[in-house]
Amino acid sequence: MTNKIVFNPFLIVFCFLLVACTSNTYEDIIEIEEETTLTLKWNKAYGDDTLEKSIIGLRWTLSYMGATIPAATNGITSENNFIEIDLDKIGFTIEAIQKILQLHEVIKTSDEYSVTGAIDMGRYVTLLLGSAEHYYEITGVPNLLSEVLDKYELQLDMGYVNNSGVSFEHRIISFSEQNGFNQLFFCTERDRITNEILEYETVEILPNGQPRFGVFDANGFRKNSTDPLHSNAGKPAKCMWCHESGIQPLFSVQDDFEGFIPYLDFKDTLSNFNSSHRNLQNALIDGVNFEETQQHTFAEFLYILFMEPSAERLSLEWGISVSEVEDLLSSLSTHSQEEFLFFENLYFREEVEPFAPFNGLQVSSSVREQSEIEVNYIN
């Protein structure tokens, strides 16, 4: 006796729908992964440069932008000279991811990404740190100063700085109580003669231990940089470079003013805040290694040597020989980097871009200082 196979039409339909749903779900997953990942290309920029150092610099950059960089996941992977970042695994907030995805969408439609399948790592870091608007939107600095101040209770005691190493004016420093990584430092810039309020700066501490910087005009509206007539503080990236992820101490002797904390007491207060802050940073498991105090320099090298590239770096970017680069740029002069004098024979990015074999996404004309060109691809 043979067994007779009976086909159940309802079962066939069910299986077809199950396969279709499974297929769609898989395609959806792939699409989501493609949305949240971005490919970067590392181009060696100086003699001792390595992919490992540059990835450390990239981690610091993402940390500055608010990423916690969980130790339990690997949101940064590399193969040969290409690095892939996955926003879902780096520890950004949902709000930050939404902002970064807007930037990534523009990057992926650029000529550079189409031709090379990636964006230069230095260009990417420059777009993050060198655009004040990108920094503000991703880290969540509000448009209005009042929105910052509403989140904190400032103490009555204030410090007075009349001999700043950054500002040409007088500064009044207010601060909230230190509560873990929840603290605000609020600076009011006042004309040293008229006492008129000129602008404001804020320093908040992010959950990952990094300071978040904001600059606001006299009316309390967010702005891209301090006014160079009154201050050398520049853009948020310059604040990062100067503060080095800490609470800035007083480097110069200040006069005592009635109604304000005496200079020596204020100096001790800031030093104590900074010590407590460093201890909290060093206790973190996730994120960058705050105990390696000079590793932030690797992030700075990424944007400095992108903005001021050598012929050797450009040859890697453009896929041509060094001699071909030098021939193309024979009409341009070279220079040494003013901060790191051992970086020599460099060009300026704005001068070499017209010679590139593809169009890279434009960056701000300065990373740290007030810029003639200030890009914003998010809003």
Image (spheres, rainbow, N blue to C red):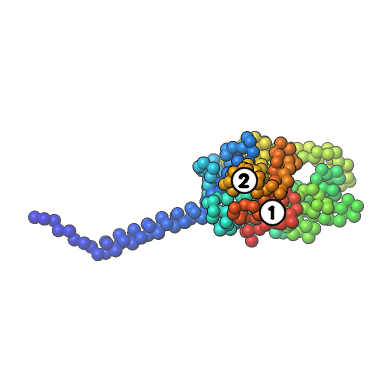
Image quadrant holding the C terminus, namely: bottom right
Report whether 367 appears left or right of 284. Answer: right
Report whether 239 appears left or right of 7. Answer: right
Q: Nearer the viewer, residue 300 or 80?
A: 80
Q: Which residue is at the far left?
A: 1
Residue 146 appears in the figure: no
Q: Amino acid at mark 1?
A: Ser
Image quadrant holding the N terminus, namely: bottom left
* Location of mark 1 (residue): 364
Figure label count? 2
Under circle 2, the secondary element is helix
Residue visible at 73% across and 43% down in the picture:
335
Report whether 79 appears left or right of 220. Answer: left
Q: Can you tell which mark lies on residue 52? A: none
User: Which of the two discs, 1 and 2, labels the residue nearer the N terminus?
Assistant: 2
Q: Nearer the viewer, residue 273 or 300?
A: 300
* Location of mark 2 (residue): 324
Residue 372 appears in the figure: yes
Q: Which residue is at the far right?
A: 193
